[in-house]
Image (tube, rainbow, N blue to C red):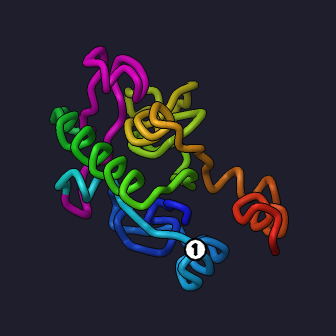
Amino acid sequence: MILVSACLAGVRCRYDGEAGKIPLIEEWIEEGKAIAICPEQLGQLPTPRQRAEIKGGSGEDVLTGKAWVCTEGGNNITREFILGARRVLALTQALGIKRAVLKAKSPSCGYGIIYNGDFSGELVTGKGVTSALLEQHGIEIFTEENLIDLGEGETKNAFNGGRD
C-alpha cells in the first residue's frame, strides 16, 4: 500500500479548493494499491483556507519548535499542521505503509524543496511537516515531480517491487 496526497488523487483539498489529478495515482487508488490523505484536513483545517508557509526553517524545525507554520494573513497554524502530520503517521503505522507520494513544495507534504516562508514564491531546500515526520519514522518519500521524472512504467515498477 502506498500513501498519497489526496490532492494528487483528484480530491479538492488544496488550500484553494482545487486538486491536481495525476492519472497514475488515480489508477493506484482504483486498484486498491494506494490510500489518499490530506494532512491539513486531518489537522482540522478547512478547505478552502489561506495559503500557509513555514517560517524560520523547515518541517523538521517545526517539529522541534524552532519554526512555525503561518497563513498569508499571519495566523499561526503550527498546531494544526503537527496534528495532521501525527494523524498521517498513525495511519501509515497502522497500515504498515512504507512509501508515500506527497505534494511537492507544500508546507505539509513538500519534500526536497518548499516555499521560503515569506509568500514570495521563492523556493528553498527543505521538507514539509508531514514529510519530515514520516521520514523520521522510516517512510520513503516521493513527490509527483519524481513520478514525472521516472516515467509511468518505471514508477509502477518502483512501487510494486518490479512486478508489473
* Residue located at (30% from left, 19% from top): 64
Any magenta on residue 147?
no
Residue 68 x %, y %: 27, 25
The image quadrant where one finds the C terminus is bottom right
Is residue 73 positioned above or below 24 on the image? above
Instruction: Identify the image quadrant of residue 129.
Output: top left
Residue that appears at 59% across and 44% down: 140
The image shows residue 71 at horizontal and vertical percentages of 25, 39
Q: Which residue is mark 1?
A: 33
Q: Nearer the viewer, residue 86 or 129?
A: 86
The N terminus: image quadrant: bottom right
Answer whether residue 121 is visible to the viewer in this image. no
Determine whether 134 is above or below 22 in the image.
Answer: above
On screen, residue 111 versus residue 137, left or right, reads: right
In front here: 135 or 107? 135
Helix or strand or loop: what does disc 1 sit on? loop
**Residue 110 in the image: above or below residue 125:** below
Question: Would residue 105 be seen by someone viewing this image from the given angle?
Answer: yes
**Residue 97: x %, y % from top left:** 50, 56
What residue appears at the point 72 percent right and 65 percent down from the top-left corner?
A: 160
For the point 57% across and 52% down, the residue is: 99
Q: Residue furthest toward the bottom?
A: 30
Q: Is residue 32 left or right of residue 74?
A: right
Look at label 1 and name its amino acid: Lys
Q: Could you say which quadrant of the image residue 66 lies in?
A: top left
Q: Which residues are magenta?
A: 46-72
